[in-house]
Structure formats: C-alpha cells, structure tokens
Amino acid sequence: MLFLFLSTWMNVDLNTHANELKARALDQWAGTLAMRVNGNEFPEASPVMPVYIRIRLDKGVKLAETLVDLITSPTRYEPISLAMSLKSTDDSQLIAPQDTAQIVRWLQGESEFWLRVQHTSSHWLEKSGVLQAPDLDHVVEWTMGRSIEEDRLVNEPLVPLGRANLPTNVQGSDAVHTHIIVDSSVSILTYKPPYRESNLDIIAMNYQTQGVRTAEHSTQIQLGDAASANFSGDDTLGIATDQGDFWLIPLDLRGYETVIQVPNSTGHSRPISIEMLADTGTPFAAVPLSINPGFNQLTNYNTNTAILIRESGELHIKLVLSNRFNQRFSIPAIRAVPERRFMLSVPARLSLFNPNKEDAAVKVNVFNDVGHLLSGSVLKLASHTRTHIEIPLLQRHQHLQVASAHPIVAGAVEVSGTEWLRVIPSKVVTRDVQGGLK
C-alpha cells in the first residue's frame, strides 16, 4: 500500500505562469513552464536510449520563432541544454550532467516542441557518496519561457553550491533565452470559455521515437512506446482576450490635437478598427481602416473620450497629443487587467473604464511605502462606462492599487493645468490560472 501511495504522488509536476494573449495575433509572449521532477521518472534514460517529451500547444496556437532547428540546418541546430536546479533542505548535491535535459526541436509554425532526457534520473543526485533519484524532499526543476537574465538570477548562485548544473540554458557555448513566443492568428482562441485558455498537452515517449531531429514536419515524427514519466499540475500557458488596446484621455485635455502613429513593417496592408468611446463608454463611432506598409499618421480624432483600437498584433501603435504650444505628449496603450499598481509622488488623475458586459466592483486603495492602507474605496463601475478620480498625495511616496474580479482599464496621469501632461507608469499584477496573485 505504501508503494501505491508514493507512485500516486511522485511524478513530473507542471507549474505554469499564464500570460494574457490576444486571440488573433502574431509574435506574443506566452507564459512560463516549469517541470519539477519529484520521483524517479526517467530511470530508463541514457544517451543511447533517451526519453522524448512532446509538449503540444492546443487550439491552433503555433510557435512563432525557431529556437532549435533540424540537425541538417546550418544554424540553430544544436540542442538547448536546460539548467537543472535542486530544491532540498539537506546537503544533497545535483550531479546530473549538463546535457541531461535538452530542447531538441522547436520550429516556427509548428504546434509542438520536443525535449530529450538522456541520463537516468536514478543518478541525478548524490548524498554522502550514494547516488539517488529525486523524491518529494529532493525536487529537480527546469524552466522554459524565461530570459537569460531571469535564468541566471535563479540558477547561477546555486552552481557553486552543487544545487544547479548550469547558470543558464545554453545552446553550444552561448547562453540563450527560451521565451515561448506564439502565433494565435489562425487559432480558435476566444476571450470566452471554453476556448479562452491556451493549454499544453504533454506526453513522454521512449527511444523508439524517430525523426525528432530530422523530420521536415512534426506530423512525420514516428512515436515510440510510452515512457514511464507521468505529468500533472498546471497546463495553461496563456489566457485570451479580444478587447484590444485602450487609450484613456484625461477629461481636461479636450481640444488637444490627436495623432495616431501606426508604422507597418509587415510589407502588406493590415486591417485595424478604431472606436471612439463617449464619456459613458458607449461607442459612437467605429472606423475600419486598412493600414498601408510604411509609416502612417491618422489625424482628426477627438480627445474628449477614450479610444479603442483592435488589430491583429502585428502593428505598433502610438497615440500622440499636441497642445497649443506644439508640445507633444505620448499616451501609452493600456490593456484591461484585473490588477494594476502605480507609484505616486504627485497628485494624480485616475481614469477607469469597464469594458466588460457585466458591472464591476473596483477597489481603489492607497498604501504608504511599508504597506499600510492610507485610504480605500470600492466603486461600482457599470458595463462600458468610464470615470475619473482625483488621487491626492497623502504622503511623499505612495502606492495606488486598482483591483477587480473583472479586467479593468486603468490609467493615471499627472496634469499641470491644461497645458502639460505626464503619464504615470504602472505595474500589472498577473494572476495564475487558479486566480491567485503571482
């Protein structure tokens, strides 16, 4: 009975951080995927008889970048060795070779990427001269989806302690990122369930798998028999939104000249839709446009409202305001998110818009530097309405939190009279797929 209990819990535990994705867009950063091995999941692995792991994106989402090409390619053909780290409270050492876990196929346009494990997990660890496998108290982990700097921050301090086998993920002799950049332009993702989440399907196959490094297309890979590894845990890599990008204009800036700058480097005309939202948030004008290749400037847009622009994710749009002295101010795009935070050193004007079909309760809290609440309120923001709130400066430095169970558009500006504008930067607080804060 004890064996049955342990075999139920010992596996490869998946932990993902899900990013927001536009439902129809190119070149988007999906989340991160960590694999945490807490059992002897790869006992059969060896350089001659490796275990292959197929990680497949669902709902028509595809990889937008090649990280590991075919072995016949002149560039990027070398596998990426993944930095492994040990989570343990005793003096065990991670002695797994640096090429133990590798990315061996990651091709633009395919809906899956492949890993290879080629050293037995029975010998990944050493304690008091005895070789041992990972277990619930000795967890071995590797992560995909991070930058070089993020990997280095986590792993480099562990290498001299015998708790990591590499400071970063490496390809040949070069440190490399493993950002999971995806193309959802032909996917079936929508912002409504059941097609809102971009999920992963992960299986392990034995050494009989053929064509991972050589097949021209992933459909030509011949799968071997199932390997012993089991996978469980989080499998959500992205959460879709169809709401587009918003620009919120402070009410007292009416009369500014507005220019929408749209550089198009795709080489093809691309469609966008521009909607003007009245003070209530109700759309009163939606303009479909075709943006030609090159630099485009769109003018004659009123600034007494908010602007919503929907596009495929291939364009980089910038909104510029000009006052009567021909001074120009750039307003950044704002995505609807459940929580956003601002650092304030001046009084600010907070603009809120609820793009949802349901009313939203919005918390607006102000904290000091040590996290004590200075003021707090809860607003009921009706569907597709907007409001503005003056935030006084109660202390020299304070933090402004805007949070809701629904994705809300929130922007803050410092305004001096009607002639000068400064946008206050913000930080998005993302949530994992269970709804907790990351």
Image: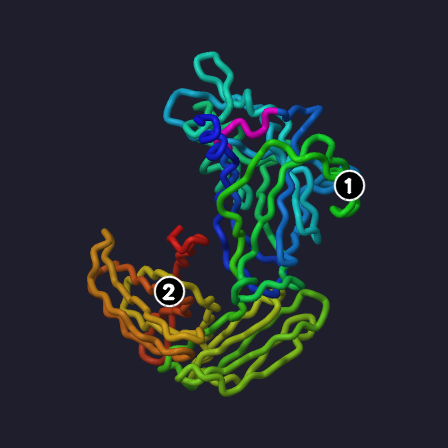
Q: Is residue 273 visible?
A: yes
Circle 1 or circle 2, nearest the eye:
2
Return the x and y of residue 215 as percentages of the image width and height.
Answer: 78, 42
Occupied quadrant, residue 270: bottom right
Mark 2 closeness class: few <14, some 14–19, many ≥20 residues within 10 Å: few
The residue under label 1 is which amino acid type? Answer: Ser
Task: Name the residue: 53% across, 86% down.
Answer: 285
Q: Is residue 194 magenta?
A: no
Q: With respect to residue 67, does 316 lie above or below?
A: below
Q: With respect to residue 191, does 368 lie above or below?
A: above
Q: Is residue 335 left or right of residue 52?
A: left
Task: Name the foreground residue: 263 vs 389.
Answer: 389
The residue under label 2 is which amino acid type? Answer: Ala
Task: Name the residue: 63% across, 37% down.
Answer: 204
Task: Name the residue: 45% across, 31% down.
Answer: 5
The residue carrying mark 1 is: 73
Q: Is residue 307 left or right of residue 371?
A: right
